Protein backbone atom coordinates (compact mmCIF):
# COMPACT_ATOMS: atom_id res chain seq x y z
CA UNK A 1 0.00 0.00 0.00
CA UNK A 2 1.19 3.45 -0.82
CA UNK A 3 4.16 2.21 -2.84
CA UNK A 4 5.62 4.52 -5.44
CA UNK A 5 5.39 3.42 -9.06
CA UNK A 6 9.15 2.75 -9.22
CA UNK A 7 8.85 0.44 -6.20
CA UNK A 8 5.87 -1.32 -7.78
CA UNK A 9 7.87 -1.72 -11.00
CA UNK A 10 10.87 -3.05 -9.09
CA UNK A 11 8.69 -5.74 -7.48
CA UNK A 12 7.21 -6.59 -10.88
CA UNK A 13 10.66 -6.77 -12.50
CA UNK A 14 11.86 -9.18 -9.82
CA UNK A 15 8.67 -11.22 -10.17
CA UNK A 16 9.22 -11.62 -13.91
CA UNK A 17 12.42 -13.56 -13.16
CA UNK A 18 10.26 -16.39 -11.77
CA UNK A 19 8.77 -16.95 -15.23
CA UNK A 20 10.24 -19.28 -17.85
CA UNK A 21 9.59 -19.24 -21.60
CA UNK A 22 6.35 -20.96 -22.61
CA UNK A 23 4.74 -20.83 -19.17
CA UNK A 24 1.06 -20.06 -18.56
CA UNK A 25 0.87 -17.29 -15.99
CA UNK A 26 -2.04 -15.63 -14.19
CA UNK A 27 -1.61 -12.01 -13.15
CA UNK A 28 -3.85 -10.78 -10.35
CA UNK A 29 -4.98 -7.22 -9.72
CA UNK A 30 -2.53 -4.52 -8.63
CA UNK A 31 1.27 -4.92 -8.82
CA UNK A 32 0.93 -8.28 -10.67
CA UNK A 33 -0.58 -6.42 -13.65
CA UNK A 34 2.85 -4.83 -14.24
CA UNK A 35 4.81 -8.10 -14.50
CA UNK A 36 4.21 -8.69 -18.23
CA UNK A 37 6.09 -5.49 -19.10
CA UNK A 38 9.33 -7.10 -17.97
CA UNK A 39 9.27 -10.17 -20.23
CA UNK A 40 10.46 -10.46 -23.81
CA UNK A 41 7.50 -11.22 -26.09
CA UNK A 42 9.50 -13.91 -27.92
CA UNK A 43 9.37 -15.97 -24.72
CA UNK A 44 5.77 -16.74 -25.66
CA UNK A 45 4.52 -16.61 -22.11
CA UNK A 46 0.73 -16.98 -22.21
CA UNK A 47 -0.88 -14.66 -19.71
CA UNK A 48 -4.21 -15.89 -18.39
CA UNK A 49 -6.83 -13.42 -17.23
CA UNK A 50 -9.83 -14.72 -15.29
CA UNK A 51 -12.23 -12.47 -17.21
CA UNK A 52 -11.77 -14.84 -20.14
CA UNK A 53 -8.52 -14.22 -22.01
CA UNK A 54 -5.56 -16.51 -22.59
CA UNK A 55 -2.75 -14.62 -24.29
CA UNK A 56 -2.96 -11.12 -22.80
CA UNK A 57 -0.50 -8.79 -24.52
CA UNK A 58 1.07 -5.45 -23.52
CA UNK A 59 -0.90 -2.38 -22.50
CA UNK A 60 -2.10 -0.46 -25.60
CA UNK A 61 -0.76 2.95 -26.50
CA UNK A 62 -3.12 5.74 -25.52
CA UNK A 63 -5.96 6.08 -27.99
CA UNK A 64 -5.72 2.47 -29.17
CA UNK A 65 -7.73 0.93 -26.30
CA UNK A 66 -10.63 -1.38 -27.12
CA UNK A 67 -13.74 -0.91 -24.96
CA UNK A 68 -14.25 -4.67 -24.66
CA UNK A 69 -10.67 -5.69 -23.99
CA UNK A 70 -9.25 -5.35 -20.49
CA UNK A 71 -7.56 -7.54 -17.94
CA UNK A 72 -9.37 -8.68 -14.79
CA UNK A 73 -8.43 -5.42 -13.09
CA UNK A 74 -10.20 -3.35 -15.74
CA UNK A 75 -6.97 -2.07 -17.32
CA UNK A 76 -7.01 -2.01 -21.15
CA UNK A 77 -4.78 -4.63 -22.74
CA UNK A 78 -3.89 -5.99 -26.17
CA UNK A 79 -3.53 -9.60 -27.32
CA UNK A 80 -0.50 -11.80 -27.83
CA UNK A 81 -0.47 -14.02 -30.92
CA UNK A 82 -2.36 -17.23 -30.24
CA UNK A 83 -4.78 -15.55 -27.82
CA UNK A 84 -8.31 -16.81 -27.22
CA UNK A 85 -11.50 -15.65 -25.50
CA UNK A 86 -13.80 -17.83 -23.37
CA UNK A 87 -16.38 -17.57 -20.61
CA UNK A 88 -15.68 -17.51 -16.86
CA UNK A 89 -16.47 -21.20 -16.44
CA UNK A 90 -13.73 -22.13 -18.90
CA UNK A 91 -11.40 -19.49 -17.41
CA UNK A 92 -11.54 -21.25 -14.05
CA UNK A 93 -11.61 -24.67 -15.67
CA UNK A 94 -8.09 -23.91 -16.88
CA UNK A 95 -7.10 -22.98 -13.33
CA UNK A 96 -8.82 -25.87 -11.56
CA UNK A 97 -7.45 -28.48 -13.93
CA UNK A 98 -3.89 -27.43 -13.06
CA UNK A 99 -2.94 -25.75 -16.31
CA UNK A 100 -1.69 -22.48 -14.78
CA UNK A 101 2.04 -22.63 -13.95
CA UNK A 102 2.34 -19.50 -11.82
CA UNK A 103 -0.19 -17.16 -10.22
CA UNK A 104 0.92 -13.73 -8.99
CA UNK A 105 -1.48 -12.36 -6.38
CA UNK A 106 -1.73 -9.26 -4.24
CA UNK A 107 -2.30 -9.66 -0.50
CA UNK A 108 -3.31 -7.83 2.66
CA UNK A 109 -1.45 -10.33 4.88
CA UNK A 110 0.53 -13.55 4.46
CA UNK A 111 1.43 -15.94 7.28
CA UNK A 112 4.68 -17.83 7.82
CA UNK A 113 2.90 -20.99 6.61
CA UNK A 114 1.76 -19.32 3.40
CA UNK A 115 -1.80 -18.55 4.45
CA UNK A 116 -3.25 -15.76 2.30
CA UNK A 117 -5.60 -12.96 3.40
CA UNK A 118 -6.70 -10.66 0.61
CA UNK A 119 -10.43 -10.09 0.69
CA UNK A 120 -11.69 -8.18 3.73
CA UNK A 121 -10.68 -5.84 6.55
CA UNK A 122 -13.65 -6.44 8.86
CA UNK A 123 -15.55 -3.27 9.73
CA UNK A 124 -13.40 -1.19 7.38
CA UNK A 125 -13.16 -2.36 3.83
CA UNK A 126 -14.66 -5.23 1.91
CA UNK A 127 -12.97 -6.15 -1.36
CA UNK A 128 -14.50 -9.55 -1.98
CA UNK A 129 -13.09 -12.98 -2.45
CA UNK A 130 -12.70 -12.80 -6.25
CA UNK A 131 -10.64 -15.54 -7.83
CA UNK A 132 -8.00 -15.69 -5.09
CA UNK A 133 -8.99 -18.97 -3.43
CA UNK A 134 -8.99 -20.94 -6.66
CA UNK A 135 -5.80 -19.45 -8.10
CA UNK A 136 -4.12 -20.00 -4.73
CA UNK A 137 -5.30 -23.60 -4.50
CA UNK A 138 -4.75 -24.78 -8.06
CA UNK A 139 -1.89 -22.81 -9.64
CA UNK A 140 1.33 -24.85 -9.57
CA UNK A 141 3.21 -21.96 -7.95
CA UNK A 142 1.74 -19.00 -6.04
CA UNK A 143 3.76 -15.81 -5.62
CA UNK A 144 2.49 -12.85 -3.60
CA UNK A 145 3.53 -9.38 -4.75
CA UNK A 146 2.80 -6.72 -2.17
CA UNK A 147 4.09 -3.88 -0.03
CA UNK A 148 6.07 -5.08 2.98
CA UNK A 149 4.04 -2.87 5.36
CA UNK A 150 0.43 -1.73 5.56
CA UNK A 151 -0.65 1.93 5.60
CA UNK A 152 0.03 2.10 9.36
CA UNK A 153 3.59 0.84 8.76
CA UNK A 154 2.80 -2.51 10.35
CA UNK A 155 4.16 -5.79 8.94
CA UNK A 156 1.92 -7.66 6.50
CA UNK A 157 4.00 -10.83 6.86
CA UNK A 158 2.96 -12.45 10.15
CA UNK A 159 3.10 -15.63 12.22
CA UNK A 160 -0.67 -15.87 11.79
CA UNK A 161 -2.90 -13.72 9.58
CA UNK A 162 -5.16 -11.50 11.68
CA UNK A 163 -7.54 -10.91 8.77
CA UNK A 164 -9.95 -13.57 7.49
CA UNK A 165 -8.19 -15.97 5.12
CA UNK A 166 -8.76 -16.39 1.41
CA UNK A 167 -6.78 -19.64 1.29
CA UNK A 168 -4.61 -21.69 3.62
CA UNK A 169 -1.00 -22.79 3.09
CA UNK A 170 -0.89 -21.81 -0.55
CA UNK A 171 1.80 -19.16 -1.00
CA UNK A 172 5.22 -20.36 -2.21
CA UNK A 173 7.05 -17.06 -2.39
CA UNK A 174 6.67 -13.41 -1.28
CA UNK A 175 8.20 -10.46 -3.12
CA UNK A 176 8.04 -6.97 -1.58
CA UNK A 177 9.94 -3.71 -2.01
CA UNK A 178 12.20 -4.83 0.85
CA UNK A 179 12.73 -8.54 0.39
CA UNK A 180 12.19 -11.84 -1.35
CA UNK A 181 11.34 -14.85 0.80
CA UNK A 182 10.32 -18.43 0.24
CA UNK A 183 7.69 -20.24 2.24
CA UNK A 184 9.16 -23.58 3.35
CA UNK A 185 7.87 -26.35 5.60
CA UNK A 186 10.15 -24.97 8.32
CA UNK A 187 8.89 -21.39 7.89
CA UNK A 188 9.96 -18.30 5.96
CA UNK A 189 13.38 -18.26 4.35
CA UNK A 190 14.79 -14.84 3.40
CA UNK A 191 16.70 -15.05 0.12
CA UNK A 192 17.07 -11.43 -1.03
CA UNK A 193 17.18 -8.00 0.56
CA UNK A 194 16.35 -5.12 -1.79
CA UNK A 195 18.28 -1.87 -2.02
CA UNK A 196 18.24 0.48 -0.05
CA UNK A 197 17.04 -1.66 2.87
CA UNK A 198 19.31 -3.43 5.33
CA UNK A 199 18.90 -6.96 6.62
CA UNK A 200 17.88 -5.49 9.95
CA UNK A 201 15.22 -3.29 8.31
CA UNK A 202 13.71 -6.42 6.80
CA UNK A 203 13.88 -8.60 9.91
CA UNK A 204 12.44 -5.97 12.27
CA UNK A 205 9.60 -5.16 9.86
CA UNK A 206 8.60 -8.78 9.37
CA UNK A 207 6.10 -10.14 11.90
CA UNK A 208 7.30 -13.74 11.70
CA UNK A 209 10.64 -15.49 12.33
CA UNK A 210 12.93 -15.49 9.30
CA UNK A 211 15.50 -18.10 8.43
CA UNK A 212 18.32 -16.42 6.52
CA UNK A 213 19.32 -18.29 3.39
CA UNK A 214 22.97 -19.22 3.17
CA UNK A 215 22.79 -17.75 -0.33
CA UNK A 216 21.25 -14.46 0.84
CA UNK A 217 21.71 -11.72 -1.75
CA UNK A 218 21.81 -8.01 -1.09
CA UNK A 219 20.24 -6.72 -4.33
CA UNK A 220 21.39 -3.35 -5.70
CA UNK B 1 -39.93 -17.35 -37.57
CA UNK B 2 -41.21 -14.94 -34.94
CA UNK B 3 -38.64 -12.35 -34.01
CA UNK B 4 -37.65 -12.09 -30.35
CA UNK B 5 -36.76 -8.42 -30.77
CA UNK B 6 -38.79 -6.22 -28.42
CA UNK B 7 -38.36 -2.75 -26.96
CA UNK B 8 -36.39 -2.15 -23.78
CA UNK B 9 -39.62 -0.96 -22.12
CA UNK B 10 -41.41 -4.22 -23.00
CA UNK B 11 -38.42 -6.24 -21.81
CA UNK B 12 -38.26 -4.58 -18.42
CA UNK B 13 -41.98 -5.30 -17.92
CA UNK B 14 -40.74 -8.85 -17.19
CA UNK B 15 -38.94 -7.59 -14.11
CA UNK B 16 -40.84 -7.17 -10.84
CA UNK B 17 -39.93 -6.11 -7.33
CA UNK B 18 -38.28 -8.82 -5.28
CA UNK B 19 -37.18 -11.11 -8.11
CA UNK B 20 -33.85 -12.92 -8.46
CA UNK B 21 -32.07 -10.99 -11.19
CA UNK B 22 -28.88 -12.38 -12.70
CA UNK B 23 -26.63 -9.99 -14.62
CA UNK B 24 -23.72 -10.57 -17.02
CA UNK B 25 -20.53 -8.51 -16.98
CA UNK B 26 -17.14 -8.38 -15.30
CA UNK B 27 -15.86 -5.11 -13.84
CA UNK B 28 -18.28 -3.22 -16.04
CA UNK B 29 -17.28 -4.84 -19.32
CA UNK B 30 -20.10 -6.80 -20.93
CA UNK B 31 -22.83 -5.36 -18.69
CA UNK B 32 -26.29 -4.76 -20.18
CA UNK B 33 -26.34 -1.07 -19.23
CA UNK B 34 -29.49 -0.01 -21.10
CA UNK B 35 -31.61 -2.63 -19.34
CA UNK B 36 -30.14 -1.62 -15.98
CA UNK B 37 -30.90 2.05 -16.68
CA UNK B 38 -34.51 1.18 -17.44
CA UNK B 39 -34.84 -1.01 -14.33
CA UNK B 40 -33.63 1.96 -12.27
CA UNK B 41 -36.03 4.35 -13.99
CA UNK B 42 -38.98 2.04 -13.35
CA UNK B 43 -38.14 1.95 -9.65
CA UNK B 44 -37.79 -1.80 -9.08
CA UNK B 45 -36.60 -2.70 -5.61
CA UNK B 46 -35.90 -5.52 -3.15
CA UNK B 47 -33.96 -7.34 -5.84
CA UNK B 48 -31.77 -10.33 -5.24
CA UNK B 49 -28.86 -9.62 -7.57
CA UNK B 50 -26.54 -12.34 -8.81
CA UNK B 51 -23.44 -11.30 -10.72
CA UNK B 52 -19.66 -11.37 -10.86
CA UNK B 53 -19.09 -8.08 -9.03
CA UNK B 54 -20.73 -4.92 -7.71
CA UNK B 55 -19.50 -2.79 -10.63
CA UNK B 56 -19.04 0.91 -9.99
CA UNK B 57 -21.20 3.22 -7.87
CA UNK B 58 -22.30 5.40 -10.77
CA UNK B 59 -22.27 3.04 -13.74
CA UNK B 60 -23.98 -0.15 -14.84
CA UNK B 61 -24.93 -2.84 -12.35
CA UNK B 62 -23.40 -0.89 -9.46
CA UNK B 63 -26.10 1.78 -9.77
CA UNK B 64 -28.76 -0.73 -8.67
CA UNK B 65 -26.78 -1.21 -5.46
CA UNK B 66 -25.92 2.44 -4.90
CA UNK B 67 -29.60 3.38 -5.36
CA UNK B 68 -30.48 0.74 -2.72
CA UNK B 69 -32.59 -1.40 -5.03
CA UNK B 70 -30.83 -4.59 -4.00
CA UNK B 71 -31.48 -6.38 -0.71
CA UNK B 72 -29.35 -9.44 -1.35
CA UNK B 73 -26.22 -9.80 -3.49
CA UNK B 74 -24.58 -13.06 -4.54
CA UNK B 75 -21.20 -12.16 -5.97
CA UNK B 76 -17.42 -12.50 -5.85
CA UNK B 77 -16.00 -8.98 -5.55
CA UNK B 78 -17.31 -5.57 -4.45
CA UNK B 79 -14.06 -3.61 -4.04
CA UNK B 80 -14.78 -1.25 -6.95
CA UNK B 81 -18.09 -0.06 -5.47
CA UNK B 82 -17.62 1.41 -1.97
CA UNK B 83 -21.41 1.77 -1.59
CA UNK B 84 -21.75 -2.02 -1.58
CA UNK B 85 -19.22 -2.45 1.24
CA UNK B 86 -20.79 0.38 3.23
CA UNK B 87 -24.34 -1.00 2.87
CA UNK B 88 -23.03 -4.44 3.81
CA UNK B 89 -21.40 -3.15 7.01
CA UNK B 90 -24.54 -1.12 7.85
CA UNK B 91 -26.63 -4.26 7.51
CA UNK B 92 -28.68 -2.82 4.62
CA UNK B 93 -27.36 -5.26 2.06
CA UNK B 94 -26.88 -8.98 2.57
CA UNK B 95 -23.83 -10.14 0.61
CA UNK B 96 -22.92 -13.76 -0.05
CA UNK B 97 -19.44 -14.14 -1.50
CA UNK B 98 -18.32 -17.05 -3.60
CA UNK B 99 -14.96 -17.65 -5.24
CA UNK B 100 -15.29 -16.49 -8.84
CA UNK B 101 -14.96 -19.83 -10.60
CA UNK B 102 -17.36 -21.45 -8.16
CA UNK B 103 -19.98 -18.76 -8.75
CA UNK B 104 -19.53 -19.18 -12.51
CA UNK B 105 -19.88 -22.95 -12.24
CA UNK B 106 -22.97 -22.69 -9.96
CA UNK B 107 -24.59 -20.47 -12.59
CA UNK B 108 -23.57 -22.83 -15.39
CA UNK B 109 -25.00 -25.79 -13.46
CA UNK B 110 -28.28 -23.92 -13.03
CA UNK B 111 -28.39 -23.25 -16.74
CA UNK B 112 -27.72 -26.79 -17.87
CA UNK B 113 -30.11 -28.54 -15.50
CA UNK B 114 -27.69 -29.85 -12.90
CA UNK B 115 -28.78 -29.59 -9.23
CA UNK B 116 -25.37 -28.80 -7.72
CA UNK B 117 -21.62 -29.00 -8.14
CA UNK B 118 -18.97 -30.57 -5.91
CA UNK B 119 -16.21 -28.30 -4.67
CA UNK B 120 -13.05 -29.10 -2.74
CA UNK B 121 -13.57 -27.88 0.85
CA UNK B 122 -10.34 -25.88 1.05
CA UNK B 123 -11.40 -23.73 -1.89
CA UNK B 124 -14.64 -22.67 -0.27
CA UNK B 125 -12.65 -21.29 2.66
CA UNK B 126 -13.90 -18.13 4.24
CA UNK B 127 -17.12 -16.68 2.98
CA UNK B 128 -18.69 -19.50 1.06
CA UNK B 129 -21.21 -21.66 2.85
CA UNK B 130 -19.99 -25.11 3.70
CA UNK B 131 -23.17 -26.66 4.94
CA UNK B 132 -23.31 -29.91 3.12
CA UNK B 133 -20.34 -32.21 2.84
CA UNK B 134 -20.35 -35.38 0.80
CA UNK B 135 -17.78 -38.13 0.44
CA UNK B 136 -16.99 -39.19 -3.10
CA UNK B 137 -14.14 -41.35 -4.39
CA UNK B 138 -12.41 -41.20 -1.03
CA UNK B 139 -12.44 -37.41 -0.68
CA UNK B 140 -14.69 -34.87 1.02
CA UNK B 141 -16.49 -32.29 -1.07
CA UNK B 142 -18.84 -29.40 -0.41
CA UNK B 143 -22.16 -29.54 -2.23
CA UNK B 144 -22.68 -26.12 -3.80
CA UNK B 145 -26.26 -25.82 -5.10
CA UNK B 146 -26.84 -24.64 -8.65
CA UNK B 147 -28.05 -21.07 -9.15
CA UNK B 148 -30.94 -19.98 -11.33
CA UNK B 149 -32.76 -16.67 -11.66
CA UNK B 150 -36.23 -15.36 -12.43
CA UNK B 151 -34.69 -13.14 -15.08
CA UNK B 152 -31.19 -13.14 -16.55
CA UNK B 153 -29.94 -10.10 -18.47
CA UNK B 154 -26.88 -10.27 -20.70
CA UNK B 155 -24.91 -8.17 -23.17
CA UNK B 156 -23.89 -9.48 -26.59
CA UNK B 157 -22.22 -7.99 -29.65
CA UNK B 158 -24.43 -9.69 -32.23
CA UNK B 159 -27.72 -11.55 -32.26
CA UNK B 160 -30.07 -12.88 -34.87
CA UNK B 161 -33.82 -12.63 -34.49
CA UNK B 162 -33.97 -16.19 -33.07
CA UNK B 163 -31.74 -15.02 -30.20
CA UNK B 164 -28.49 -16.71 -31.16
CA UNK B 165 -25.74 -14.67 -29.53
CA UNK B 166 -22.12 -13.81 -30.27
CA UNK B 167 -20.11 -11.90 -27.69
CA UNK B 168 -17.09 -9.65 -28.08
CA UNK B 169 -13.67 -10.17 -26.54
CA UNK B 170 -13.60 -9.92 -22.75
CA UNK B 171 -17.25 -8.79 -22.76
CA UNK B 172 -18.12 -12.50 -22.93
CA UNK B 173 -17.13 -13.33 -19.29
CA UNK B 174 -20.16 -14.70 -17.40
CA UNK B 175 -22.69 -13.65 -20.06
CA UNK B 176 -23.02 -17.07 -21.77
CA UNK B 177 -23.56 -18.69 -18.33
CA UNK B 178 -26.12 -16.12 -17.18
CA UNK B 179 -27.89 -16.48 -20.53
CA UNK B 180 -28.68 -20.12 -19.69
CA UNK B 181 -29.64 -19.73 -16.03
CA UNK B 182 -32.66 -17.43 -16.19
CA UNK B 183 -36.27 -18.61 -16.43
CA UNK B 184 -36.46 -15.62 -18.73
CA UNK B 185 -33.35 -14.37 -20.53
CA UNK B 186 -33.14 -10.93 -22.08
CA UNK B 187 -30.13 -10.10 -24.26
CA UNK B 188 -29.09 -6.51 -24.88
CA UNK B 189 -27.35 -6.45 -28.24
CA UNK B 190 -25.40 -4.06 -30.42
CA UNK B 191 -26.12 -5.58 -33.83
CA UNK B 192 -29.27 -7.55 -34.66
CA UNK B 193 -29.50 -9.54 -37.88
CA UNK B 194 -32.21 -11.68 -39.50
CA UNK B 195 -32.06 -15.38 -38.51
CA UNK B 196 -29.70 -17.16 -40.88
CA UNK B 197 -27.27 -14.27 -41.14
CA UNK B 198 -24.94 -15.46 -38.37
CA UNK B 199 -22.50 -18.27 -39.08
CA UNK B 200 -23.76 -21.21 -36.96
CA UNK B 201 -20.11 -22.11 -36.25
CA UNK B 202 -19.60 -18.77 -34.52
CA UNK B 203 -22.65 -18.78 -32.26
CA UNK B 204 -21.73 -18.96 -28.57
CA UNK B 205 -25.20 -18.95 -26.98
CA UNK B 206 -27.84 -20.84 -28.97
CA UNK B 207 -31.10 -18.92 -29.23
CA UNK B 208 -33.03 -21.63 -27.36
CA UNK B 209 -31.79 -20.01 -24.13
CA UNK B 210 -32.83 -16.48 -25.08
CA UNK B 211 -36.42 -15.26 -24.75
CA UNK B 212 -36.07 -11.65 -25.80
CA UNK B 213 -33.52 -9.44 -27.48
CA UNK B 214 -33.35 -5.66 -27.20
CA UNK B 215 -31.23 -3.15 -29.04
CA UNK B 216 -28.71 -1.46 -26.76
CA UNK B 217 -28.84 2.29 -26.54
CA UNK B 218 -25.08 2.20 -26.00
CA UNK B 219 -23.24 3.91 -23.23
CA UNK B 220 -20.74 1.14 -22.56
CA UNK B 221 -17.96 3.35 -23.89
CA UNK B 222 -14.76 3.59 -21.99
CA UNK B 223 -16.16 3.32 -18.50
CA UNK B 224 -15.12 -0.28 -18.25
CA UNK B 225 -11.60 1.06 -18.35
CA UNK B 226 -11.73 2.47 -14.89
CA UNK B 227 -9.15 0.30 -13.27
CA UNK B 228 -9.95 -1.19 -9.90
CA UNK B 229 -6.23 -1.80 -9.39
CA UNK B 230 -5.83 1.05 -6.96
CA UNK B 231 -8.61 -0.12 -4.66
Image (cartoon, rainbow, N blue to C red):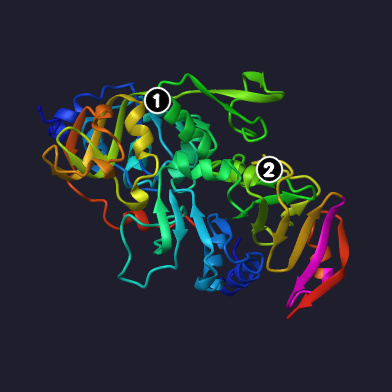
Residue B207: quadrant of the picture: top left
* Quadrant the N terminus of chain A occupies: bottom right
| x then y, percent, for residue B160 | 17, 39
Q: Which mark is drawn over residue B123?
A: none
Does residue B168 sit above or below B159 in this rendering? Answer: below
Q: Position of residue B185 (x, y in %)?
A: 27, 29
Q: Are marks 2 and 1 in contact (CB under 8 Å)?
A: no
Magenta-span inclusion, residue A93: no
**In-image side of A213 versus A161 (left or right):** right
In front here: A156 or A144? A144
Residue picked out by circle 2: A163
**How much space separates mark 2 and mark 1, taking CA atoms?**
37 Å
Q: Which chain contains the residue that carries disc 1?
A: B
In the picture of the structure, the residue carrying the numbered disc 1 is B112
* Parent chain of label 2: A
Q: Single out the mark in the foreground, 2 or 1.
A: 1
Q: Please name whichever residue, B96 or B114, is drawn nearer the observer in this view of the structure.
A: B114
Dot 2 falls on a residue whose secondary structure is loop
Q: Which secondary structure, mark 1?
A: loop
Q: Are marks 2 and 1 on the same chain?
A: no
Q: Judge whether A110 appears above or below A45 on screen.
A: above
**Residue furthest to the front:** B201
Is B149 left, or right, of A14 in this rendering?
left
Using the image, determine if residue A62 lies above or below residue A72. below
In the depicted view, which residue is nearer to us: B80 or A55? Answer: A55
Measured as percent of width and height from the top left, residue B91 is found at 50, 29
What span is colored magenta in the figure? A186-200
Amino acid sequence: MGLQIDQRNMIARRAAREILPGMTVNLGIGIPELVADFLPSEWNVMFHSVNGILGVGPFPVQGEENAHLSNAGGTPVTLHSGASFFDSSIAYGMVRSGRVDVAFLGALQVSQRGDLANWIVPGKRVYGIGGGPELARYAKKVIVLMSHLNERNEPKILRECELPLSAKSCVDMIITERAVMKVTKQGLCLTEVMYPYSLEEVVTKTGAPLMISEYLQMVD
Amino acid sequence: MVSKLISIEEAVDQIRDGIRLMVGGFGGIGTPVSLIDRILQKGMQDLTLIGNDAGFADQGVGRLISHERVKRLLTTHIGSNPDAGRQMMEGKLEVLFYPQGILAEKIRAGGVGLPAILVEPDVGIGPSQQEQLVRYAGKNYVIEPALTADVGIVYAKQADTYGNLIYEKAARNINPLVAMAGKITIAEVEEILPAGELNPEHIVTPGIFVNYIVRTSGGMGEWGFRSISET
